[in-house]
Amino acid sequence: MLADVIDLVYYRKNSSDEFPMLADVIDLVYYRKNSSDEFPMLADVIDLVYYRKNSSDEFPMLADVIDLVYYRKNSSDEFPMLADILSEEFIG
């Protein structure tokens, strides 16, 4: 469940474990969940990543997410859910 992934992210951010710079994505998820916006779709997150990567804003270490999405979209795998991407980042 996405909630479990968010809990894991929160743990990683607040422990001695290193967290691979996806905190900004989670911040966006929290913001969207707690505002008038609907819970974000993966496409919304990718749009933000694309904007951040191609503007003056820094958004380090999210190239791997883009690569994963591109691979998943162009293979026999289904388009990834946000939880899948976070799991891929944690595991491998």
Image (cartoon, rainbow, N blue to C red):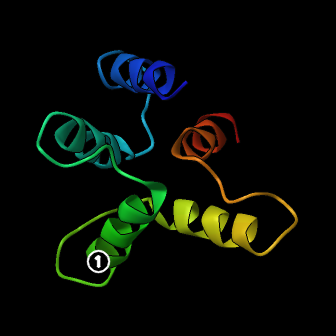
Residue at image location 50% in from the left, 67% down from the top:
63
Specify the quadrant of the image occupied by residue 1.
top right
Determine the residue positioned at 54% across, 60% down.
Answer: 65
Residue extending furthest toward the right: 76
From the viewer's perspective, is 43 left or right of 53? right
Front position in the image: 10 or 83:
83
| Mark 1 residue type | Tyr
- Up-down: is 74 above or below 40? below
* Whole-percent x, y for residue 92 in the image: 70, 42
Drawn side of residue 42 relative to residue 64, left or right? left
In the depicted structure, whether residue 92 falls above or below residue 77: above
Horizontal side of 75 relative to 24 (left or right) equals right
Residue nearest the viewer, comparing 42 with 19 = 42
Residue lying at 32% horizontally and 43% vertically, measured from the top left: 39
Q: Is residue 68 left or right of residue 37?
A: right
Quadrant in the rendering for residue 20 = top left
Residue 29 x/y as whole percent: 29, 42
Q: Which residue is mark 1?
A: 51
